[in-house]
Image (spheres, rainbow, N blue to C red):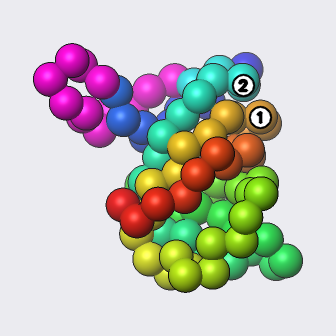
Amino acid sequence: MQVEALGFIDFGQGLALKSVMAEIGDHIELTGTLIRDGAGFALRAERGVIYHLQLHRVPVDHVEKQVRVAGILIEDRLIEAEGVAHG
């Protein structure tokens, strides 16, 4: 299954934001606002798309801030996050 994601593509001269089609299992990087999602967290990305996050650490300092999330797309709109950083 392909999922449209707004991510960063490396063109060799830096990163550019681009709408890309991601497959389940692909490594992706997205930016957006980190929000609370029930007992967990989610990323509100471009166009208001919500990606639920599986996190190994709780990024409470980043809630309601612009962040960059890197991880593996494991389901439609679900990312196993490897890291969350200020974006």
Look at label 1 and name its amino acid. Ile
The circle on residue 45 is none
Q: Is 15 situated left or right of 8 in this image?
A: left
Q: Is residue 31 above or below residue 67?
A: above
Q: CA distance from mark 1 to mark 2?
A: 5 Å
Residue 17 in which image quadrant:
top left
Q: Is residue 76 above or below residue 67?
A: above
The circle on residue 74 is 1
The 10 Å Cα crowd at callout 1, few under 14, some 14 to 19, many 20 or more, is some
Mark 1 vs mark 2: which is more N-terminal? 2
The residue labelled by disc 2 is: 24
Image point (23%, 19%), residue name: 11
x and y percent of residue 22 in the render? 57, 25
Residue 73 is inside the magenta segment: no
Residue 71 in which image quadrant:
top right
Magenta stretch, residue numbers: 10-21
Look at label 2 and name its amino acid. Ile
| Residue with the most extreme right position | 39
